């Protein structure tokens, strides 16, 4: 399977712009609402955002660094790697999302969080837009990015797909949390 590089970057950019807009909208909500949980086993809105921020702390500088080191000209298309394609697909949001375990280092459960988490998320989305712009000058199939899984490196195109799909997955989780809170199904943290 080949993916058109230009179309992929345009689709991912559109999603990141949506995430940025939705993140900016969260700044209008009271901190208390952002810290509410629909039930004792779920994350609050701020915990969802902090989880995405923790992954952004790894992937954003790594993608930028690897694009900067690249000496390959951009290619009009790229062929996803087996593992990277599987991982990106696994993160793609579905109608009924299956719960997944996260690394302990990326789990914000029980953290004391404030609206600064939203500001950090917004800044990361702006940085990601810059990386997507820079990626237009890189070969999405030849540039490799280290994963959070030790010793694993994945094609830039697959990393971008995984990372944006991961964020979309959790932005949908944020929407569900806020809907549950509006319905009155919530616990104060």
Image: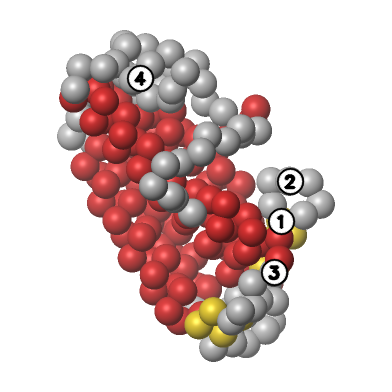
Helix, strand or loop at label 1? It is strand
Q: Which mark is residue 37?
A: 4
Q: Which residue is mark 1?
A: 146
Height in image: 130 above or below 75?
above
Residue 116 is at least partly visible in this image: no
Determine the CA span between mark 1 and mark 3. 14 Å
Instruction: Choose top left, top right, bottom left or bottom right for residue 35.
Output: top left
Left or right, 166 with respect to 188, comes to right
In the rendered image of this protein, does residue 99 appear above or below residue 181? below
> Badge 3 is on which residue?
81
Numbered label tally: 4
State the SS at label 2.
Answer: loop
Nearer to us of marks 2 and 4 is 4
Instruction: Of the two numbered discs 2 and 4 on the same chain, state the one appearing first in sequence.
Output: 4
Question: Left or right: 9 with respect to 36?
Answer: right
Mark 3–mark 2 distance (CA, rounded to whole Å): 16 Å
* Spatial CA span between label 2 and label 1: 8 Å
Q: Residue at x 20, y 30 (%)?
A: 29
């Amino acid at each position: 399977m080949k993916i058109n590089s230009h179309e992929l970057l345009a689709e991912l950019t559109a999603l990141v712009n949506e995430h940025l807009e939705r993140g900016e909208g969260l700044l209008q909500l009271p901190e208390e609402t952002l810290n509410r949980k629909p039930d004792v086993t779920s994350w609050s809105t701020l915990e969802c955002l902090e989880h995405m921020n923790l992954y952004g702390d790894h992937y954003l500088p790594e993608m930028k660094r690897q694009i900067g080191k690249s000496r390959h000209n951009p290619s009009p298309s790229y062929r996803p790697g087996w593992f990277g394609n599987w991982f990106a697909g696994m993160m793609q949001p579905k109608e009924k999302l299956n719960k997944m375990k996260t690394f302990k280092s990326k789990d914000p459960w029980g953290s004391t969080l404030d609206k600064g988490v939203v500001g950090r998320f917004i800044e990361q989305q702006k940085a990601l837009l810059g990386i997507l712009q820079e990626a237009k000058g890189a070969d999405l199939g030849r540039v490799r990015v280290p994963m959070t899984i030790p010793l694993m490196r994945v094609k830039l195109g697959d990393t971008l797909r995984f990372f944006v799909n991961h964020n979309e997955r959790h932005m949908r989780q944020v929407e569900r949390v806020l809907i549950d809170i509006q319905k009155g199904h919530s616990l104060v943290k």
